[in-house]
Amino acid sequence: MKKHIAVFVSGSGSNFQSIIDGVNNKEINAEIMLCVASKAGTLGEQRAIDNGIATTVMDKSLGLENEFGRVAEMLTRLNVDYIILAGFLTILPFSFVRKFKNKIINIHPSLIPKFSGDGFYGMRVHEAVITAGETESGCTVHFVDEGIDTGDIIDKAIVAVLPSDTPETLQQRVLKEEHRLLPKVVKMLCD
Ligand code: GAR
């Protein structure tokens, strides 16, 4: 039986697209029941609309607890098995994490525990990796617990940092690996 999944996005949603592609080509045995966008007008939200995926945009003016409560009700009604944070940059309230314990996964653009936790997201991660003179970086998929990027690690991919790299070139190379790693993990969970 197909698993029910929900994907949470904040930005361009290229990782979301890798999941849409995996579902469409039947690699991932799942149905995307809902896309949750942290704000309106993102490319991530547009990808959901273009693919006929039900979408809800968060209204943070109602308070995070309230909004996540509303989303939680939708997810429960849709019998969602897994929640995938695909570039979702809002920190989840504890109540939400506890409600969906062992069901939420996140992709992070570094080799956790390095360059992870509060303040490390998106391009900031790659800037910090270059500044620190690291010779390797990568991406990590992990379960979400009450901490920031502290949950159990499911899988990682390593990418070499080249002497000529800028944060932008490194981001591109890591993102390419993210698009391979995330659908691979989602497939594994859904199988
Ligand atoms: C990705 O690199 C993802 O790993 C990162 O945001 C980017 C979103 O790109 N997530 C985090 O930094 C979470 N801490 P996308 O919207 O094109 O998938």
Image (tube, rainbow, N blue to C red):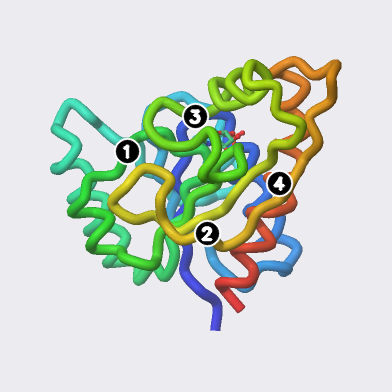
Question: x%, y% of residue 128?
Answer: 58, 21
Residue tagged 4 = 179
State which quarter of the image contains the N terminus. bottom right
Label 2: which secondary element:
strand
Cβ of mark 4 under 8 Å from ligand 1: the answer is: no
Disc 3 to disc 4, C-alpha distance: 17 Å
Tell me which label, 1 or 4, sits earlier in the chain: 1
Disc 3 to disc 1, C-alpha distance: 11 Å
Tell me which label, 2 or 1, sits earlier in the chain: 1
Label 4: which secondary element:
helix
Instruction: Specify the label residue 121 is tagged with.
Output: 3
Q: In this rendering, is residue 144 above or below 167? A: below
Query: Could one spot residue 66 in this view of the protein?
Result: yes
Tell me which label, 4 or 2, sits earlier in the chain: 2
Disc 4 to disc 2, C-alpha distance: 17 Å
Tell me which label, 2 or 3, sits earlier in the chain: 3
Question: x%, y% of residue 148?
Answer: 37, 42
Mark 4 or mark 2, whichever is nearer to me = 2
Number of residues whose C-alpha sits closer than 10 Å to that of mark 1, classed few (under 14), some (14–19) or many (20 or more):
few
- Tag 1: residue type? Ile
Instruction: Specify the label residue 91 is tagged with.
Output: 1
Residue at point 50%, 56% (across, down): 142
* Label 1 with label 4: CB-CB less than 8 Å: no
> Which one is nearer the viewer's eye here, 25 or 144?
144
* Label 4 with label 2: CB-CB less than 8 Å: no
**Ligand number 1: quarter of image:** top right
Residue tagged 2 = 153
